[in-house]
Image (cartoon, coloured by chain):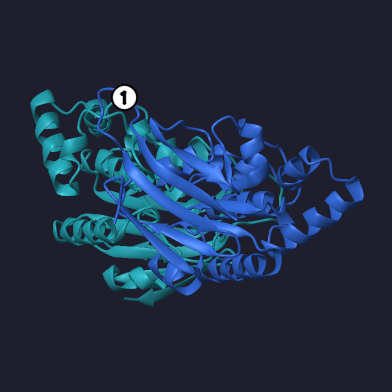
């Protein structure tokens, strides 16, 4: 089982050049696959296409043998947990703990189980003392940890992580890296890791795919 | 005389709170120094920079005490617009700072507000775009750029203002290796021209570029020579 990216081409509008050109890749379950490339090479654009936020001009995304062309955003969200590059773009609750609860409530989980899971992820990402805080008063690094906690708490089958370590200090990077390995091994989670953090990629990724100028390298 | 003097600085985001994010912080920074502010996430690095830039308490409120003198100005006695001529602040999140429709407009915006003559603004914008390797993006909409490209635009928009003090809050976080090298070299070159530079980071690996490092932990600061 995997996420297959098949010959994707994309441009933002008619006047501009293609950001992605015939790009193909496969992200397997139970593995951390890093997608690396210079700034502006199309990594984040590809993540948005896989998530269904952008529609490609050409090509297809196949998840577990199913073409996602007709999937709604909600369906895509059920398949893949998405941590965006900028955490402030995906936080909208008024309390830290409510941000983690939100995805679980939408999954229809029982309240007792939600409470248990929120407590687990608050502790794992060292956010317990902030549980009642308004998320926008957090530092950038704390916001990044909150978004990771909120998405990982859902325990999706696949994860799309766009620069998840950009605002994390060395201690928190290690906590995240160890957790990603754990969910790959124990839950067979497939992880797409978009990152410039060479050290993190070398330490935790199973495979590395390269992109440059929107093309496979 | 030091260009930045901070004495017994205390700050809490909530009034009458005992949760001081900065607790009796004292240090000086000399003109032309490159100072690294290092510490774990949430330790108060960005808060300290926002105070030096006057954003706290002018735009973000809280309980503040102590003395902050920037280029002989007591920042509690001047308007934010006046301090902006001395201190250029590149925020951690470039999306919070980019406001115009094209990259070149973004680079011109700060200088226009400082009433720099149009011809000189054009020269500054061209020279900074060349320095940062973003000339080919001049007419692009910044919102369509990648995170790393936005970070370079945000840095460029502060450089065109030519402030005496430049604060870069985690400037390397979204950059590839080439971009990181470029910013390190730019910092070095600005420092040689007498600019005072503060770089916030949570990584010791950038330590090589600093004359001095300030380590922040639980609201307290300790100093290490570079």
The answer to which of A10 and B157 lies nearer the viewer is: A10
Q: Which chain is blue?
A: A
Residue B71 visible in the current orientation:
no
| Quadrant of res B21 | bottom right
Q: Nearer the viewer, residue B72 or B194?
A: B194
Residue B199 quadrant: bottom left
Picture coordinates of residue A6, whole percent (x, y): 43, 44
Residue pictured at 54% horizontal, 55% vertical: A141
Question: Is residue B157 shown to the viewer in this render?
Answer: yes
Dot 1: element: loop
- Residue A199 location in percent, x, y? 41, 71
Q: Which chain letter goes with mark 1?
A: B
- Point out the image quarter for the N terminus of chain B: bottom left
Question: Which of the pair B62/B7 is nearer the observer?
Answer: B62
Quarter in which the C terminus of chain B is drawn = bottom left
In the image, taking residue B192 as reference, residue B26 lies left or right, namely right
* Image colour assigned to chain B: cyan
Q: From the top left corner, tell me how far across and down residue B13 is, in percent.
A: 62, 46
B167 lies left or right of A203 = left
Q: Residues within 10 Å of mark 1 (few under 14, many from 20)?
A: few
Q: Nearer the viewer, residue B192 or A122?
A: A122
Q: Residue A176: give x, y in percent of width and height.
A: 59, 65
Number of disc labels: 1
Indicate left or right for B160 with A192 as reference. left
Q: Is residue A214 above or below residue B124?
A: below
- Residue topped by disc 1: B101
Pick out the residue farthest to the front.
Answer: A65
Which residue is drawn at the image coordinates 91% and 51% (left, top)?
A112
């Amino acid at each position: 089982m995997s996420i297959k990216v098949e010959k994707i081409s994309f441009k933002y509008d008619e006047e501009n050049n293609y950001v992605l050109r015939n790009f193909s890749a496969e992200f397997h379950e139970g593995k951390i696959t890093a997608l690396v490339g210079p700034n502006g090479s199309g990594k984040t654009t590809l993540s948005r296409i896989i998530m269904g936020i952008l529609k490609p001009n050409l090509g297809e995304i196949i998840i577990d043998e199913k073409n996602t062309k007709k999937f709604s955003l909600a369906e895509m969200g059920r398949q893949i947990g998405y941590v965006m590059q900028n955490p402030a773009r995906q936080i909208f609750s008024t309390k830290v703990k409510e941000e983690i609860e939100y995805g679980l409530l939408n999954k229809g989980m029982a309240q007792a189980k939600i409470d248990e899971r929120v407590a687990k992820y608050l502790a794992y990402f060292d956010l317990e003392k902030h549980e009642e805080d308004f998320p926008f008063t957090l530092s950038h690094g704390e916001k990044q940890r909150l978004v990771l906690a909120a998405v990982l708490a859902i325990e999706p089958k696949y994860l799309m992580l766009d620069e998840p370590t950009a605002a994390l200090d060395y201690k928190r990077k290690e906590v995240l890296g160890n957790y990603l390995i754990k969910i790959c091994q124990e839950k067979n989670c497939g992880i797409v890791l978009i990152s410039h953090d060479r050290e993190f990629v070398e330490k935790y990724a199973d495979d590395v795919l390269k992109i440059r100028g929107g093309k496979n390298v | 005389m030091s260009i930045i003097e901070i004495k017994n600085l205390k700050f809490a985001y909530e009034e009458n709170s005992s949760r001081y994010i900065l607790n009796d912080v004292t240090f000086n920074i000399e003109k032309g120094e490159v100072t690294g502010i290092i510490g774990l996430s949430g330790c108060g690095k960005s808060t300290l920079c926002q105070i030096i830039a006057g954003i706290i308490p002018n735009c973000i409120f809280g309980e503040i005490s102590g003395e902050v003198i920037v280029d002989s100005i007591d920042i509690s006695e001047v308007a934010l617009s006046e301090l902006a001529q001395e201190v250029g602040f590149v925020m951690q999140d470039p999306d919070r700072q980019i406001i115009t429709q094209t990259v070149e407009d973004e680079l011109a915006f700060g200088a226009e507000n400082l009433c720099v003559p149009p011809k000189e603004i054009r020269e500054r914008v061209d020279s900074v775009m060349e320095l940062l390797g973003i000339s080919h993006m001049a007419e692009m909409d910044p919102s369509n750029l990648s995170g790393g490209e936005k970070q370079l635009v945000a840095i460029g928009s502060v450089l065109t203002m030519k402030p005496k003090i430049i604060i870069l809050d985690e400037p390397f976080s979204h950059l590839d290796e080439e971009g990181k090298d470029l910013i390190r070299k730019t910092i070095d070159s600005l420092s040689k021209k007498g600019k005072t530079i503060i770089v916030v980071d949570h990584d010791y690996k950038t330590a090589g570029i600093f004359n001095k490092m300030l380590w922040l932990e639980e609201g307290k600061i300790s100093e290490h020579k570079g």
